[in-house]
Image (tube, grey):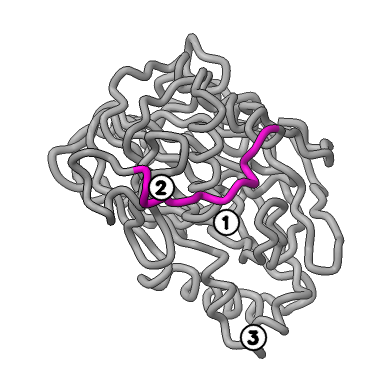
């Protein structure tokens, strides 16, 4: 990840046509065996079917076999749905392997590896989260928000899922901002917060194992990052205002520690209100893509010692811009001790 890169990379989809609105099929273009409602879910000129899930976030996409060589119309329809619904779900993508998942990510921009955690062996960018080795992301967060140009999108593929439990929940941070009381919106519009990967891990997860605590110290914080972000960023494609918080948000600049903690808690609780969320029950082969600039997510840790393996590729992002046009800045990049963990320990 290029921390200093302030110029947004345009993906092949962005260059062509994903500003195109998703249009329903015209009534004259009837599809045999489908109701009018079903036809209206089909994106014009494609076989892509978009089915909204929750009221403010999430849609399931059908009629697509994901790959790195999707045609332009399909790719544009998927991107348009991503921007509108923030997180999109694909069932039955069992044909994808690690290489194909990385190739798929290339449709959305430049894939990028995690800045501190080692990639899965044999891949270029892929991060494996294996519950058997502490890979349980059970805290609300936006991926890698402790750097300036954090990922614009994440692509997660389910490899092994528990028989019960192990769902993931996403929250729409644009809807959260929109539904703040006006006076609170006006107050937070000009505030900035420090995000860091060196946050209070034990306080977030009081029941962590010794192995997980060691992994966090030796691998996740092998390089310490601190970045100043606006609490409210302007989405570079939709123009929406989104709240930028999550567990990497350490403190609000200019406030006392007590006031900062109270305001962070108030805003975070507003983001994760049920009305702003969607929950997904995984099956092996599912793929989920989310707009990391407009969401937070939480992996529910309710499956005990059952195994859960998911693999993630992220797409390089742009530096957030505040309402008044200022850009986020990384203020600290400090290597500590080298990561000595094996690939299995880091998954």
Left or right of residue 60: residue 259: right
Query: What are the residue bounds of the magenta stretch?
Result: 16-29
Mark 3 = which residue? 184
Q: CA distance from mark 3 to mark 1?
A: 19 Å
Residue sitting at x 65%, y 57%: 238
Examine the rendering and report whether any part of residue 342 can be seen.
no
Q: Nearer the viewer, residue 178 or 114?
A: 178
Mark 1 = which residue? 294
Left or right of residue 342: residue 332: right
Examine the rendering and report whether any part of residue 105 can be seen.
yes
Secondary structure of residue under mark 3: helix
Q: CA distance from mark 3 to mark 2?
A: 41 Å
Sequence-earlier tag: 2 or 1: 2
Q: Main secondary structure of the magenta part?
A: loop
Q: Position of residue 127 (x, y in %)?
A: 48, 27
Q: CA distance from mark 2 to mark 1?
A: 28 Å
60 above or below 70?
below
Q: Nearer the viewer, residue 18 or 85?
A: 18
Based on the picture, tell me whether residue 122 belongs to the magenta stretch. Answer: no
Which is more foreground, mark 2 or mark 1?
2
Q: Which residue sits furthest top?
A: 122
Mark 2 = which residue? 25
Q: Which residue sits furthest bottom?
A: 183
Crowding near the residue tagged with mark 3, few <14, some 14–19, many ≥20 C-alpha atoms within 10 Å: few
């Amino acid at each position: 990840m290029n921390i200093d890169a302030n110029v947004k990379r345009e993906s092949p989809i962005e260059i062509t046509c994903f500003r195109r609105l998703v249009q329903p099929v015209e009534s004259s273009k009837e599809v045999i065996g489908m109701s009018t409602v079903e036809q209206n879910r089909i994106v014009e000129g494609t076989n892509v079917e978009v089915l909204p899930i929750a009221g403010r976030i999430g849609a399931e996409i059908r009629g697509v076999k994901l790959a790195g060589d999707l045609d332009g119309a399909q790719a544009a329809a998927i991107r348009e749905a991503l921007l509108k619904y923030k997180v999109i779900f694909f069932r039955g993508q069992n044909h994808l392997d690690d290489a194909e998942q990385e190739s798929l990510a290339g449709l959305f921009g430049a894939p990028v590896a995690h800045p501190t955690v080692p990639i899965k062996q044999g891949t270029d960018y892929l991060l494996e989260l294996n519950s058997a080795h502490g890979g349980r992301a059970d805290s609300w967060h936006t991926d890698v928000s402790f750097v300036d140009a954090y990922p614009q999108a994440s692509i997660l593929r389910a490899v092994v899922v528990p028989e019960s439990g192990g769902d993931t929940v996403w929250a729409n941070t644009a809807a959260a901002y929109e539904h703040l009381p006006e006076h609170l919106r006006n107050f937070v519009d000009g505030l900035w917060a420090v995000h860091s990967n060196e946050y209070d891990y034990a306080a977030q997860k009081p029941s962590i194992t010794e192995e997980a605590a060691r992994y966090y110290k030796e691998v996740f914080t092998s390089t310490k990052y601190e970045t100043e972000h606006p609490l409210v960023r302007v989405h570079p494609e939709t123009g929406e205002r989104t709240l930028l918080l999550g567990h990497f948000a350490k403190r609000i600049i200019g406030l006392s520690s007590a006031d900062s903690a109270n305001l962070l808690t108030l805003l975070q609780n507003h983001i994760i209100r049920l009305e702003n969320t969607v929950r997904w029950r995984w099956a092996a082969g599912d793929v989920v893509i989310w707009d990391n600039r407009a969401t937070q997510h939480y992996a529910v840790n309710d499956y005990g010692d059952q195994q859960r393996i998911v693999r993630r590729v992220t797409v390089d992002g742009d530096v957030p811009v505040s309402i008044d046009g200022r850009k986020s800045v990384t203020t600290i990049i400090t290597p500590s001790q080298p990561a000595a963990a094996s690939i299995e320990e880091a998954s």
